[in-house]
Amino acid sequence: MTLVIAEAGVNHNGSDELAYELVDAAYQAGADIVKFQTFKAKNIVTEEAEQAEYQITNSGQKESQFSMLKRLELSYDTHHKLVKYCHDLGIEFLSTAFDSESLEFLVNDLGITRLKLPSGEITNAPLVLEHARTDCDLIVSTGMATLAEIEQVLSVIAFGYLNKSDTPTDELLQAAYFSDEGKRLLKQKVTLLHCTTEYPAPYSDINLNAMDTMADSFKLAVGYSDHSEGITVPIAAVAKGAVLIEKHFTVDKNLPGPDHKASLDPIELKAMVEGIRTVEKVLGDGIKGPRPSEVKNKAVARKSLVAAKDIAVGEPFSVTNIAVKRPGNGINPIHFWRYLGSQSQQNYKAGDLINE
């Protein structure tokens, strides 16, 4: 079954109450996981760093990234409460750590066993290594990345899984990536996410076929993190074989903040999950053959060999005295030519099913 991550991100706007509402909405929509973002603004951005264009456009406010992110932090105490709330509801809590302090908190304090590496951090080799050395399963988003960059981050992850203390070198990273144990651990513990890092992402830049390229290149499970408008693209990604779907959502698209306008509302999120579950059903087992619901229609829709006119016993069958007509519960007309020239073993009236 496709794993569905409802990405709350920072759409709580720094409000505990709104964070709980987001958990409720994700659970009610049928998502498997609700994901937040854990960071300390002082650890990830300078006080002068500018916002991205989409952040200014979507929030309607121009300020420094530091000011924006500081306002969007959730306290550690709130994290603990959210984990318990999610557990009691029956939905998995997940969060992305954007700095070392936050990573240590998620793993050592909250006991998280699954982590997400965001697209913007996959070239942050020290943080990637710290993630791998937790031994957690990793979801690696690949927005803006080339195949070469994905191979580089996978080499760091393989090294981190295998080596808990040594300083990596290019040679050691490559050796870890190509080792049998490194390959086994990557296949067992890593899921790659295709992604287009724009909010909203234009359809012309989605490139779902890149999922096939990634799967073929790295022989790992591949999912899709969607930033497009609507729900068509993530549902299509499941039809393409995505094992995981991540999608931003909010309780209200009109709220202030950088991501609300590019997010689904709760009704859309529920529709997306339902669409994904429908696609899973229609994909089937891949075995081509009559399905249970259609077997009963064979006799009605198909045809049989019938007498085109009266045929006497001993008379040879020919193209003039046998025909192909419904119903389809007689001799399969695929054998039409086999009967030509053979002698009838009984008398037939016109319209009788040939039965010999």
Image (cartoon, rainbow, N blue to C red):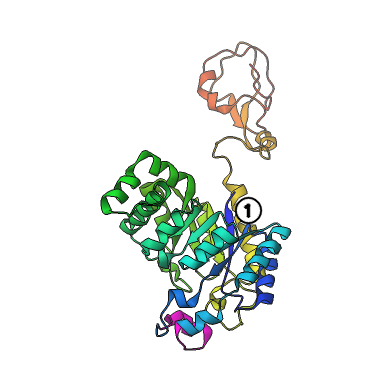
Looking at this view, name the residue that lies furthest to the front.
165
Measured as percent of width and height from the top left, residue 93 is found at 62, 61
Q: Is residue 319 visible?
A: no
The residue depicted at 43 percent of the width and 82 percent of the height is 51
User: Which residue was labeled with disc 1?
Assistant: 278
Query: Mark 1: which secondary structure?
Result: helix
* 293 or 21, nearer to the observer: 21
Is residue 328 positioned above or below 237 on the image? Answer: above
The residue depicted at 50 percent of the width and 63 percent of the height is 103
Is residue 347 positioned above or below 319 on the image? Answer: above
Q: Is residue 228 magenta?
A: no
* 193 or 304, nearer to the observer: 193
Give the number of callouts: 1
Q: Amino acid at mark 1?
A: Thr
What range of the chain is rendered magenta? 50-65
Measured as percent of width and height from the top left, residue 301 is found at 64, 38
Q: Is residue 61 magenta?
A: yes
The residue depicted at 44 percent of the width and 74 percent of the height is 44
Measured as percent of width and height from the top left, residue 195 is found at 44, 63
Q: Is residue 118 visible?
A: yes
20 horizontally vs 225: left or right: right
When asked about the image quadrant of residue 329, the answer is: top right
When asked about the image quadrant of residue 168, the answer is: bottom left
* 39 or 305, nearer to the observer: 39
In the rendered image, the quadrant that contains the C terminus is: top right
Measured as percent of width and height from the top left, residue 277 is found at 63, 53
Mark 1: give few (<14), some (14-19) or many (20+) Cα within 10 Å.
Answer: few
280 horizontally vs 25: left or right: left
Looking at this view, name the residue that lies furthest to the left.
171
* 164 or 226, nearer to the observer: 164
